[in-house]
Amino acid sequence: MTTLPNLALDLNIGRITRFALILGAVGTITAFAIAGPRNAAGFLVGAALSLITIRSWFKLANSLGADGGLPGGGAAAFLVLRYLLIAGAVYATIKVLGSAPVALISGLLVSFAAVVLELLFGLAGPKTSK
């Protein structure tokens, strides 16, 4: 039986944020060049929502690990309310700005791409034993 190697990766939120900002800027410029300002604005809104979401997940994870206790009811309410706010921002971006849904959805995937880049960066980095 083959066992998988122990891959202990520490995600660096600062690097993920930088990756997300770079990907958001490059994607916005690319969307502007290919599809125009409305779709660039849609991508930018999606990337901003994506970055806010990933940061809030990391903040929640840190609060869970800080003292071992559960976060307050405000954190749970924010997690539920966040999706309603995102839905409202998506609707407004598509209806008011006239952005294509594909541009907005692509922007929403920025944090996913940033996490994948961070994982690849961690796998390619120097191996240190603790």
Image (tube, rainbow, N blue to C red):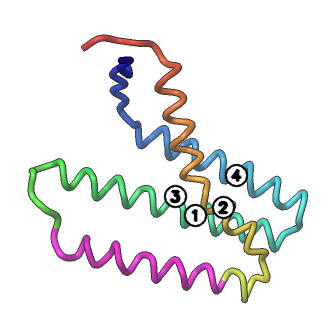
Magenta stretch holds residue 81 = yes
Foreground of the two, 2 or 30: 2
Residue 92 percent coordinates (x, y): 65, 86
Quadrant hosting residue 22: top right
Outermost residue, front side: 1
Residue hosting label 2? 107
Residue 66 percent coordinates (x, y): 15, 48
Q: Is residue 41 left or right of residue 22?
A: right
How crowded pointer 2 is (Cα within 10 Å; few <14, some 14-19, many 20+) is rated as many
Point out the tag, 2 or 4, that comes first from the N-terminus. 4
Q: Amino acid at mark 3?
A: Leu
Residue 5 percent coordinates (x, y): 37, 19
> In what element is the residue under mark 4?
helix
Residue hosting label 4? 25
Give how far apart the Cα atoms at labels 1 and 3 are: 5 Å
Point out the tag, 2 or 3, that comes first from the N-terminus. 3
Q: Quadrant of the C terminus?
A: top left
Q: Amino acid at mark 2?
A: Gly
Disc 1 and disc 3 in contact, CB within 8 angstroms: yes
Boundaries of the magenta span: 72-92
